[in-house]
Image: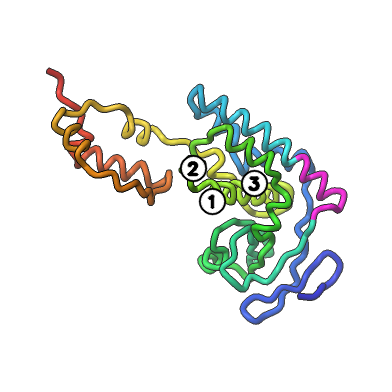
Amino acid sequence: MSTAGAGSMKINWKNKDYDLAEPSLCSLEDCLNHLESKVRIHAAIANAGDNDKATLGQLQCLLEKFLRAQFHQMGTGKWKWQPRNLTANLTGVYLVVYPDGGVKFGMSFNCQMRVQRQGCLYAAMVMKLQDMREIVSQELLSQVKKIGLPGLAFHDDQEGKLDDLITMQLCEMCLACTRECVTATVGERLVQLPNVRVCKAVAPHTFEQEVVDFMQGVPDKGVFCLLSWPTLASRLQRMAEESHFFAPTAPS
């Protein structure tokens, strides 16, 4: 990959070369405003319950501090802008360029597959996972995990996967908030809360004694969850409607 000119790089996409210019840095004011327009942190706080309001308030402070620090790094030329050809199923942050010149940032554990679904002119890899680990400190990772965000509810044995997800969410947010781009939404998992249907579905239930006895006799083979927050609500709703295990006990 060679330099195409000042502030731009030569990117090859589907056997054709493109000159990728580095997206302009927005103002610090716009950068911080993007916490609302793109991360929607204030809206999430407004819609949250009391406990979650406090949790999201802590997150807001961490995100603002992180964005300010990275904005300063970019403004002083210390940020490494090193886009690469997207030629493999890489994990990290990518960008796509649309025919009208609009630039959109995204993140995925399989960037090449994600990009194939978008009608772009060309695409490039912006940051691989190892690059992002130089940006997001272990201290920040620990602080975000300590808050206990619902959208980041991972089992303890998946902590490595959780660290990667947080790192990617933060770096995607950083690029989308500090650069002129058309990316509309970032940080979804950071501000994600269970909706009303989920809360009702997982609310405490009273079970018949025979149901309790039956469940106690079921061998413990471990639990594997293949659901995400967006799909959990509908799945639990169906379970509540179709299974007697979730049916509320009739009053005596």
Q: Residue furthest top?
A: 252
237 horizontally vs 37: left or right: left
Compare residues 159 and 251 and report the one nearer the observer.
159
Q: Residue 187: in sight, yes or no?
A: yes
Taking the spot 60% from the left edge, 41% from the top edge, the residue there is 39
Q: Give the residue number, with chain letter if any, for mark 3.
A: 170
Residue 84 placed where, x, y %? 70, 68
Asked which secondary structure carries label 1, the reply is helix
Determine whether 146 is above or below 70 in the image: above
Residue 220 placed where, x, y %? 28, 44
**Which-is-in-front pick, marks 1 and 3?**
1
Amino acid bearing label 3: Leu
Compare residues 117 and 162 and report the one nearer the observer.
162
Q: Residue 104: in sight, yes or no?
A: no
Residue 87 placed where, x, y %? 62, 73
Distance, label 2 to label 1, CA atoms, is 10 Å
Mark 2 or 1 closer to N-term?
A: 2
Distance, label 3 to label 2, CA atoms, is 21 Å
Residue 118 inside the magenta-drawn segment: no
Q: In the image, which disc is placed on residue 161?
A: 1
Give the residues in magenta: 68-79
Residue 26 placed where, x, y %? 77, 48
Q: Quadrant of the C terminus?
A: top left
Amino acid bearing label 2: Asp
Amino acid bearing label 1: Lys
Q: Give the residue number, with chain letter if any, for mark 2.
A: 156
**Which-is-in-front pick, marks 2 and 1?**
2
Label 3 crowd bin: few (<14), some (14–19), many (20+), radius 10 Å: many
Determine whether 114 is above or below 154 in the image: below
Q: Quadrant of the N terminus?
A: bottom right
